[in-house]
Image (cartoon, helix red, strand yellow):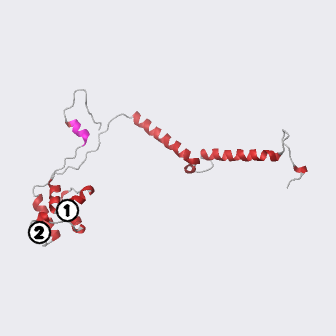
Amino acid sequence: MRGAAEVRHSPAGWREEAWRPLRMAAVAALRVVGRRLGLGAPAGRAFWGGLRKEEKEVEADKIIHEEKSEPSLICPPPRSRNYLPPEDIQSSLESHIKEIFGPSLPDNWQQTPLKENKLKYRLLAQLAAELGHAVPNSQLHLMRSAEDVLNFYSTPVKDVSKFNELCATELPPNLKIIWEQ
């Protein structure tokens, strides 16, 4: 405790204890400002995430300016998803089914159900490796019988980007597509 003799006065004549709440408020305010600026806390822990938002906005502005400065078109890499079914796809599929499912096939091999997932996987994996064309995940549930697999592998796939289709078509005279290599 301070006695009456220990009380100090500021130059303006105020007692030092009167300044204490103001000093504490100023220190707290400086801490908050320091945190917002990332001085007292890591940048990820800025006050209410304000600094993070500002950083994201600055990065987004940099990306937008970079995109605006380079207006050239670059040719996308060629896609290699074309599939042309072999002529003997039916006999090839029939031999795979007989090999995997064994002697318990129905009279018409195309009616063979693909209910057991292990056998279905073996069949589709072998065909994908042999033909270089796999059934997409979104269509696996549609492969319920050997006939469904035959229909899938009998269908040719022509995978061309829309830009390449536009280049191949006859365009109006005021429109040209030129790829930079």
Query: Is the magenta region chiefly helix, strand or loop?
Result: helix
User: Does residue 13 appear left or right of residue 168 in this picture?
Assistant: right
Disc 2 crowd rating (10 Å Cα; few below 14, some 14-19, many 20+) is few
Instruction: State the image coordinates of residue 49 (x, y, percent, origin top left).
Output: 55, 47
User: Does residue 81 appear left or right of residue 9 in this picture?
Assistant: left
Please name whichever residue, 107 or 6, is drawn nearer the observer in this view of the structure. 107
Residue located 52% across and 44% down the image: 53
Instruction: State the image coordinates of residue 166 (x, y, percent, origin top left).
Output: 23, 36
Query: Is-magenta flag for residue 165?
Result: yes
Check disc 1 and report its element: helix, strand or loop. loop
Which mark is drawn over residue 144?
1
Check disc 2 and report its element: helix, strand or loop. loop
Instruction: Using the numbered discs, state the Cα–Cα distance from disc 2 to disc 1 in whole angstroms.
Output: 15 Å
Residue located 15% across and 66% down the image: 112
Residue 137 higher or lower than 53, as above or below: below
Residue 85 higher or lower than 163, as above or below: below
Residue located 43% across and 37% down the image: 64
Instruction: State the image coordinates of residue 154 (x, y, percent, origin top left).
Output: 14, 54
In the picture, which quadrant includes the C terminus?
Answer: top left
| Residue extent of the magenta highlight | 161-167
Which mark is drawn over residue 25?
none
User: Which residue bears the numbered disc 2?
Assistant: 106
User: Does residue 42 appear left or right of residue 7 in this picture?
Assistant: left
Disc 2 marks which amino acid?
A: Pro
Q: Quadrant of residue 116?
A: bottom left
Instruction: State the image coordinates of residue 2 (x, y, percent, origin top left).
Output: 86, 53
Mark 2 or 1, nearer chain start: 2
Disc 1 marks which amino acid?
A: Arg
Query: Is-magenta flag for residue 6?
Result: no
